Image (spheres, coloured by chain):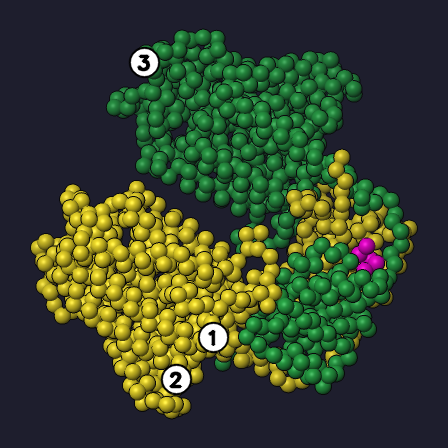
Chain colours: A green, B yellow
Amino acid sequence: MLIGRPLRTSEMSQEEITPVEGLSALSLDALTSVAYGPEAIVVVLALAGAKSLHLILPITVAIVVLLAILVFSYRQVIDAYPGGGGAYAVSRANLGASASLVAGAALIVDYTLTVSVSIAAGVGALTSAFPSLSPGTVPICLAILAVITLLNLRGLGASARAFLLPTLLFIVGLLAIIVVGLFHPLGLHEAQPGRSLLTTTRGLQVVSVLLILKAFSAGCSALTGVEAIANGVPLFRQPRAKRAKRTEMMLGFILGTMLLGLAVLARRWHVGPRSNETILSQIMGMAVGRHWAYYVVSLTITVVLALAANTSFGGLPILASLLARDNYLPHLFGLRGDRQVFNNGIWVLAVLSGALLVAVGGNTNEMIPLFAIGVFTGFTLSQTGLVVHWWRTRPERWRYRAVVNGGGAVVTALATLVFLISKFEQGAWIVVITVPLFVLLFLRIRAYYQRAGVELGIGSLPQKPVAKQTLVIVPVSNISELTRFAISEALSLSAEVIAVSVATEQADGEPGYSEELQREWSQWNPGPPLEILHTEFSSIVDPIVAFIDQERSKADRQIVVLIPMVIPSRLRYRFLHNQIDLVLSAALRKRADVVVARVQMPLEVPLR
Amino acid sequence: MLIGRPLRTSEMSQEEITPVEGLSALSLDALTSVAYGPEAIVVVLALAGAKSLHLILPITVAIVVLLAILVFSYRQVIDAYPGGGGAYAVSRANLGASASLVAGAALIVDYTLTVSVSIAAGVGALTSAFPSLSPGTVPICLAILAVITLLNLRGLGASARAFLLPTLLFIVGLLAIIVVGLFHPLGLHEAQPGRSLLTTTRGLQVVSVLLILKAFSAGCSALTGVEAIANGVPLFRQPRAKRAKRTEMMLGFILGTMLLGLAVLARRWHVGPRSNETILSQIMGMAVGRHWAYYVVSLTITVVLALAANTSFGGLPILASLLARDNYLPHLFGLRGDRQVFNNGIWVLAVLSGALLVAVGGNTNEMIPLFAIGVFTGFTLSQTGLVVHWWRTRPERWRYRAVVNGGGAVVTALATLVFLISKFEQGAWIVVITVPLFVLLFLRIRAYYQRAGVELGIGSLPQKPVAKQTLVIVPVSNISELTRFAISEALSLSAEVIAVSVATEQADGEPGYSEELQREWSQWNPGPPLEILHTEFSSIVDPIVAFIDQERSKADRQIVVLIPMVIPSRLRYRFLHNQIDLVLSAALRKRADVVVARVQMPLEVPLR
């Protein structure tokens, strides 16, 4: 009911998007990183005391330079792979299977973290504006995750037009606040003096190269999501590549402007980390005061961050289906649900990111050390792949293109190394362990499918099927309409039918019941004989299994066991009927030559 | 593995017990009530202040008089029903179905409460001796419950001989402590003065008749379990009735002595309720000091209380199986497990009493108001039934017997009324609601079985079964050994076989797969035709169901759906194979004329 009616294939991908819509559908992940990128820099710098906070400006400049390189690189990716695909597809085509598996594993880690970080940052924006909501951080995170999961199971994840209004509100609103802050701050003197900054005033840590590198790598989390447009080129209206490149350019320009503007304001106003208010919230509060504009933009940030988490729900299930098609993941990730979405991938992503949110208590900064490594591994692999691509295909101006992508690959590889070294102990080691484990899992799954395919003889025509004699065995407990129903179906399958009934020797007697059943059976004379199985044990399943095994050993026959069952009109009445079918099917599961089937008679018991 | 190997019927009831063993197997429930009976009296008296605590002695004398009446009455029950049976059987034979259902419902409530009260009191004895264990009360209760449940699932519940040592240790130890306390207390002056009594020193409530009645009825919880010997007569060695009557007499004598002794000591030493030490523990501490004897007997009390809970595990499952045989409970309560025990009844009792323990937080006194009503209802009904029995059968001295049982019935009926009135608000109303609800449930279940029996035509011979033409439908996805396996089995069932395959129109193409499958099928030429089902939706189950419905409407045939399935050698590999069988069986569940069966091919994939 919550998911909606099934959709036809033809109802898919009606929408093709324009560049501005592309910003809302594919760039929210990147644009919203302004909510945690500057924050991550300031948190690192604050470790060296309040006087080092001014370093945010040069570090942000370096990050924006890297952003420019990435934007130019991904415009090349769009030209080379107008079919979309992402790091997995690019490195699979150019760098071979191993590199593509590393890219696939890194992307899975990345998508999961994007969901968790975006939602946590969105809730962070909310609790900064309304501090009384702070204790409910984790439940609010999980509720937002549940709504996003449901929307994606309905297949509404990619409805770009619905996202347009909040995206534009967010871009225009935040840029306006930055401009006001730069030229005529309205709320600067309203900053609450009561709250103190969380900086170490003793300056325990000197401003070292290592600290700057750490701050830089933490801030690089602001660049995550830059690759999404290149992954989604097929969504654009024709001419696709041109529109996608224009969107990538717009994204780079807007994101760079926001980052630089926020850095200037943070430096000018000596903004430092506070216990329950984000950096972005502080800057906004100082720029326009805690009036309607502040609250509107805060709420918008929460909404667009939730929508940014949505981007991953578009990405991971498609990646998982590609991996499943290549036999690296279970095939069930390649099945679409009734709403034409890969629902198994959606569920796995929801569970993984939900678990992560609970584990870190909804705290964005706990996840930042894990975040950028996966993304930047993907950056490096896809750009290296492109260099190989240009080398192989040698189109017009291929040398220039190879140099741009090669430069991007070197810079992002260096950045990845910096993350790894500087953040290894704070959590980066988790990614270093997780990615190879995923690769190992992919390889083992593929090896299983290969061996299973050989065993199943897929690819070669098997011998012709051969029919055998069939014996049908029907367990019965009395003579009733159900027995007649079951024996009728059994006689339809084969002329050879045996009914069996188990006589348990009760300690307290009940003698003669089986004799009476045998007598009534002769009187009824339905055709098949009735075999009474005597047992000293209490299980009534074991004697039936033993009888079946005995019949199996007699001749090379096909044996079918038909279990008569009543299907009552109401579910709660099922407890009133014996459930022998479950026990018997389980007991016969390992006997491949025995076919077990239920004969289900509906029972409409009239109400009094 | 925990439950043990299956047992033969002939391995049951090897043990027949002697009177002393009868004490340990059937009387622990009654004997151990010394751990909560006096406690319940003191808690009520303390409400009227410390000066009313001396009333414990007259109240206990009244209870011991009632005990004597009950013991004499139950010796008559043993004579009249040497086959055992309990209140349900006695009232069913003499008072009719309605009375027996009330007795059955009261017994279910009683058995559940006995388990919870015994375990809670046992843990109370443990935490009194070792106060540091107090915070773990509920987990310890549940752990003991789990062990008892497991032992009973193994069928070891009735092993009386194992219980003999702790029972004798308990009887001898506690009697010895009482004697020492009466004549030469060793530890009286060691009582810790730091702990204050939980009495209302202001004497808010005057000592009224109501208070005395309340204390009396609370103390009657010490009489629960007196009926157990009469229920279990068949367990005794011949001459059964004589041995059982001797055991009942011993029980009455020992229990009466203990109750009176404890009451004298409690009165002499002005023992009152304390927050984390039981009355019994206080008396024992004052009698012999907190030395080895105190600790040994405390631990013994915990053990025998746990064993007393075990008595109910013998009773409730047998009662449930009797109710199931009479169609008042689902028939599955009448099935014995591999260890010859009624395991469904054991599970239900474990779950009910576990839930009760959690609900009251392992506090014995919370359950006392609920406890005795069920037991005393059973007392009243079985003795009234006996009066009718004597009247009908008129054996030697029947008038004398009828008078004894009639007297017992009147006294216990009065006591039941006192409980109901005096404890109605403290929880007795729960029993007043629960018993009729159980009776209603019994009646509705029996009505369903009667109507279902009519519908199923049980009791009259149905028409002869008729065979029909059979069409076998096999869903396939490729041509492999599995396909050959399934088509072979299908051809064994009928000459009419159709293979079906679903072609989903993927948005991204994959055209021609179904055409290629059709071409390969012609090349293979296995016999049955292959039908390709086209769909615009993503579900592959719906087109198969639609095809089946179409074939059903064509002719009156028996339709069998054979679903090919791989059974991998390891469970974890099952995630790697599609689970279409589950979805398809569920979709076809409502179609009674379609038989759904799995064709299971074992797949031994060699490890590299």
- Viewer-side label of 3, 2: 2
- Measure the alpha-carbon separation of dots 3 and 2: 88 Å
The amino acid type of the residue labelled 3 equals Thr
Task: Choose between A135 and B494: the one closer to the eye.
Answer: B494
Picture disc at residue A201: 3
Q: Which residue is drawn at 71% across and 18% down?
A: A387
Q: Where in the figure is residue A136, as x and y percent of width and height?
A: 37, 39
- Viewer-side label of 1, 3: 1
Q: Tell me the quadrant of the picture where the N terminus of chain A can be found.
A: bottom right
- Secondary structure predominantly adopted by residues drawn in magenta: helix
Q: Give the range drawn in magenta.
A: B485-491
Q: Where in the figure is residue A138, as x and y percent of width and height?
A: 42, 38
Look at the image and say whether residue B489 sits in the magenta stretch.
yes
Q: Which residue is drawn at 35% across and 56% down?
A: B169
Q: Subunit of mark 2?
A: B
Quarter of the figure with residue B9: bottom right
Picture disc at residue B238: 1
Picture disc at residue A604: none
The amino acid type of the residue labelled 1 equals Gln
Q: Residue at x 75, y 50 (%)?
A: B602
